[in-house]
Image (cartoon, rainbow, N blue to C red):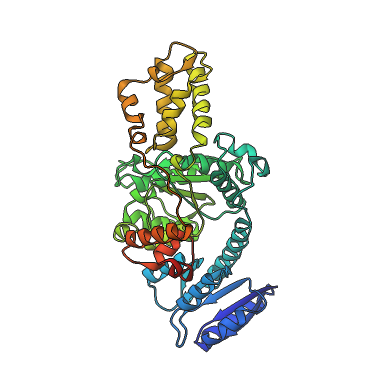
């Protein structure tokens, strides 16, 4: 039996939910109408899920949720409220709520979302147990799914383990990373590590089509009355029972964002020139180079879609944060380019690798791949040297900053932390919640150094 805590000051709502859930024979619900009692209950035996109202006297649902997360309580939470407030939903999702449902909720939908929330909770408990160091590629259950992504960086290997855990479920995934960090490679790895590995993997660049053509391209279209448009399946149907990867999700128009949100929620869609509702079983993985939680995207990116995407997210560290991978990746690209060009080049000079080690790679692995390809094309010997680079590329990667680098001066750790917290608060305009979230600490810990 799954232990469910229902918190709502409306007794009619809690009585209905209690009876309904008990009748399923799966849930053991406990009802609380006075939100002041919740903290004591949460200190006792754990719950599998909490159904939480937002607008309550004494202690609000948001305060309960924030208190849980500050204490490290990661129990899955479903928000149930009488008012559809998207900004409130996004705030709740940023605090770790799984979903936001407006009362009254359809019974079947509630049960489905509850199942998804508990699956998500189990998944994230597994992910939280993944150590930050000490993991290897060999510890992966599906290591071959990640073979195309050379790395020895502990942070990225942890991302592989996180992605592998996500692969076991059907929940949508959001992959965030700078341009060229390998978002599609991670999406393919998730697909190859999942039960859908024998089904299609379809990758789509959202900005590859004009906005007015994208709905038909994505959902498909029916023949129109004039015969000027023929029936055609969209990429959604082409990926049927497989995985659909949408890169640059932020390029979607707002109307498309609304339709995509509905599809993620229900699995339902309709083709252009048709009102017939269709259903399809597709795993959605989306990505962006943008921080879509930033206020600058409030008007251009649906908060409703955003909080559905934020539930399961993976952040890929940029190449400049994993310098140990640069020689490894350079050699990987060298082998590929040498085979493609028919040249037999053994490796790189120390000077060449030293230049790469001091370059920030704004376009990450894509840029490194291009640099190596240029070098292979220009090199006539069996060793890549600085001379094999064009003057343009050589100028760009010459580490001019090394000459004027400041000497290292040891400092107290608490001084460094205070400075970093102050800069982070300044970056977010004094917003303590966003700063704490970005730093990966609680508000209480932030106050220690603010």
Q: Residue at x 63, y 57 (%)?
A: 129
In this rendered view, identify the residue nearer to me: 137 or 432.
432
In this rendered view, identify the residue nearer to me: 432 or 355.
355
Using residue 25 as the reference point, say whether residue 243 is left or right of it.
left
Quadrant of the frame with the C terminus: bottom left
Residue 77, placed above or below residue 241: below
Q: Please provide percent x and percent y for residue 170.
A: 57, 54
Q: In the picture, residue 62 is in which quadrant?
A: bottom left
In this rendered view, identify the residue nearer to me: 88 or 259.
88
Residue 103 can be seen in this image: no
Residue 66 can be seen in this image: yes
Using residue 201 as the reference point, say whether residue 373 is left or right of it.
left
Q: Please provide percent x and percent y for residue 352.
A: 44, 24
Residue 49, placed above or below residue 318: below
Residue 43, placed above or below residue 132: below
Q: Residue at x 33, y 32 (%)?
A: 400
Using residue 149 as the reference point, say whether residue 408 is left or right of it.
left
Q: In the picture, residue 422 is in which quadrant?
A: bottom left
Q: Please provide percent x and percent y for residue 303.
A: 37, 62
Quadrant of the frame with the N terminus: bottom right
Q: Please provide percent x and percent y for residue 283.
A: 53, 50
Check the image and name the residue furthest to the top. 380
Q: Residue at x 29, y 47 (%)?
A: 212
Using residue 55 as the reference point, say whether residue 294 is left or right of it.
left
The mark tally for this picture is 0
In this rendered view, identify the residue nearer to me: 96 or 345.
345
């Amino acid at each position: 039996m799954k232990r469910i805590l229902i918190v709502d000051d409306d007794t009619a709502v809690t009585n209905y939910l209690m009876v309904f859930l008990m009748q399923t024979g799966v849930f053991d619900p406990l009802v609380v109408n006075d939100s002041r009692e919740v903290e004591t209950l949460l200190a006792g035996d754990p719950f599998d899920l909490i159904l939480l109202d937002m607008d309550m006297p004494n202690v609000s649902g948001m305060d309960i949720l924030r208190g849980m997360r500050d204490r490290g309580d990661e129990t899955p939470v479903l928000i149930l409220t009488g008012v559809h407030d998207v900004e409130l939903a996004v705030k709740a999702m940023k605090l770790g709520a799984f979903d936001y449902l407006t009362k009254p909720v359809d019974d079947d939908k509630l049960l489905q979302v509850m199942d998804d929330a508990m699956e998500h909770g189990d998944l994230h408990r597994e992910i939280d147990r993944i150590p930050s160091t000490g993991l290897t590629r060999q510890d992966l259950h599906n290591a071959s799914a990640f073979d195309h992504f050379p790395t020895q960086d502990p942070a990225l290997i942890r991302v592989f383990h996180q992605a592998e855990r996500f692969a076991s479920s059907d929940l949508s995934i959001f992959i965030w990373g700078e341009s060229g960090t390998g978002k599609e490679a991670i999406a393919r790895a998730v697909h190859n590590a999942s039960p859908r590995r024998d089904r299609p993997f379809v990758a789509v660049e959202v900005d590859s089509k004009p906005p007015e053509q994208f709905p038909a391209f994505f959902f498909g279209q029916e023949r129109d009355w004039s015969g000027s448009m023929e029936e055609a399946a969209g990429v959604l149907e082409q990926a049927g029972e497989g995985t659909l990867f949408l890169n640059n999700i932020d390029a979607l128009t707002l109307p498309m964002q609304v339709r995509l949100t509905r599809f993620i929620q229900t699995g339902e869609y309709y083709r252009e020139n048709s009102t017939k509702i269709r259903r399809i079983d597709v795993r959605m993985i989306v990505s962006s180079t943008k921080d879509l939680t930033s206020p600058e995207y409030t008007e251009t990116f649906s908060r409703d879609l955003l909080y559905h995407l934020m539930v399961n997210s993976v952040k890929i560290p940029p190449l400049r944060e994993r310098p140990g991978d640069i020689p490894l990746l350079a050699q990987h690209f060298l082998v590929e380019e040498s085979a493609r060009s028919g040249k037999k080049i053994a490796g790189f000079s120390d000077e060449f690798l030293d230049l790469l080690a001091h370059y920030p790679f704004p376009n990450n692995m894509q840029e490194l791949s291009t640099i190596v390809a240029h070098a292979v094309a220009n090199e006539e010997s069996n060793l890549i040297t600085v001379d094999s680079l064009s003057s343009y590329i050589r100028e760009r990667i010459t580490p001019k900053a090394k000459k004027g680098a400041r000497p290292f001066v040891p400092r107290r750790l608490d001084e460094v932390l205070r400075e970093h917290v102050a800069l982070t608060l300044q970056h977010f305009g004094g917003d303590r919640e966003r700063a704490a979230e970005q730093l990966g600490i609680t508000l209480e810990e932030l106050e220690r150094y603010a």
